Amino acid sequence: MSDELKVAIIGLDTSHSVEFPKRMQAPDCPPEQKVQGLRAITCLAFVTPFQNEEGINKRIKQLEAWGVKITRTFEETVKGADAIMIELNDPSLHLEYFKKCAELGLPIFLDKPLADTYINGRIIYDIAKKNNLKICSMSSLRFPPALTEALIKVPKPDYSYFYGPLGKAPAGSSIVWYGVHVFEMLVRSMGRGALSLQTNQHSNGAVVVVEYPGKKVAVADLTEDCWSYGGTLRDKAGAAAPFIVDGKIIYTDLVRELFGFIKGGPAPVPFEDTLEVMALLDTAEKSLKSGKKEKVPVL
């Protein structure tokens, strides 16, 4: 235990605050899901619109059973930590807690999405770059092996299609909150530099069409009450690579990436990619409201 890196967790309104420590230190975690080398030591727990007190208390009991100390102040939470994981389902709180963490100089994982708006996401990005902070932010859908294999077959797709759920946010934008998973796959596959997009709402979700230079196109299909992920990559030569994500291993894959990052490795995702995801999400919400094609901010 002495050589484990100590992690402080900010927030308990997301299941990730339990799922990630489970893979670090739960005695009953399946061996194939266990990630050695990290230990959650504290968790700052408080109610948000995304989780009520009953749900928070249930999660508190589970974390305490794994040796995680529940705290009520930021200062107590980060004391003695080697790294910080900002695990807040409510993205409107991300900028506030990021600013507090930025002053500590520790590695930071800011769980998805980057923020509630592109403007706030850009502030986070600028502070991180100005202060040369060690930070990363991404969804667990960044790393599924099925997508990695599809990108080996079609490394530079000209056309792509991605699908996933559209969870209903208790507060703020549902597209920003839950569409991030699909857009994480989209940006990994298509890269940065989207020009414009249009969101078309239907009775069970929304479809977002993203346009790139060279007439490249990506489609994000967000469906309510459909909890699976996948897609298809295609290029102009006719190659096609469909894929379906195995949701059982995505958390483990993410925690493994975070371990490498926290112990001194590079960020597993360029922060510019994270900002592009945020720009697409914010623009998709803007298009949903306007009913028109909208330009994506230039990063």
Image (tube, rainbow, N blue to C red):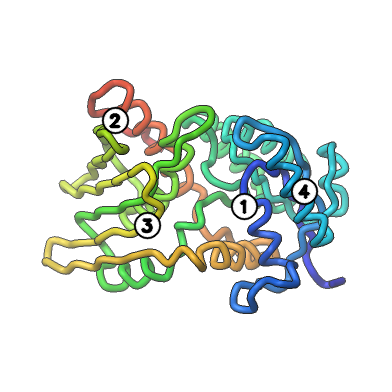
Secondary structure beneath dot 3 equals loop
Q: Amino acid at mark 4?
A: Ile
Q: Position of residue 138 (x, y in %)?
A: 52, 51
Secondary structure beneath dot 4 equals helix
Which residue ends up furthest to the bottom in the rendered image? 31
Mark drawn on residue 203: none
Q: CA distance from mark 2 to mark 3?
A: 26 Å
* Residue labelled with disc 4: 60
Mark drawn on residue 229: 3
Question: How packed is label 1: few (under 14 Cα within 10 Å), some, or many (20 or more)?
Answer: some
Q: Amino acid at mark 3?
A: Tyr
Q: Position of residue 220 (x, y in %)?
A: 30, 46
Query: Up-down: is 238 above or below 202?
Result: below
Instruction: Using residue 173 as the reference point, say whether residue 97 is left or right of it.
Output: right
Give the quadrant of the N terminus: bottom right
Q: Amino acid at mark 2?
A: Lys
Question: Looking at the image, do the residues carrying marks 2 and 4 touch, with CB atoms under 8 Å apart?
Answer: no
Q: Earlier in the sequence, mark 2 or mark 1?
A: 1
Camera-nearest residue between 58 and 165: 58
Secondary structure beneath dot 1 equals helix
Question: Looking at the image, do the residues carrying marks 3 and 4 touch, with CB atoms under 8 Å apart?
Answer: no
Q: CA distance from mark 2 to mark 1?
A: 33 Å
Mark drawn on residue 16: 1
Query: Up-down: is 2 above or below 156?
Result: below
Mark drawn on residue 295: 2
Q: CA distance from mark 4 to mark 1?
A: 13 Å
Q: Earlier in the sequence, mark 2 or mark 4?
A: 4
Question: How packed is label 3: few (under 14 Cα within 10 Å), some, or many (20 or more)?
Answer: many
Camera-nearest residue between 283 and 67: 67
Question: Which residue corresponds to the image point at 24% horizontal and 33% vertical from the top-left?
Answer: 200
Q: Earlier in the sequence, mark 2 or mark 3?
A: 3
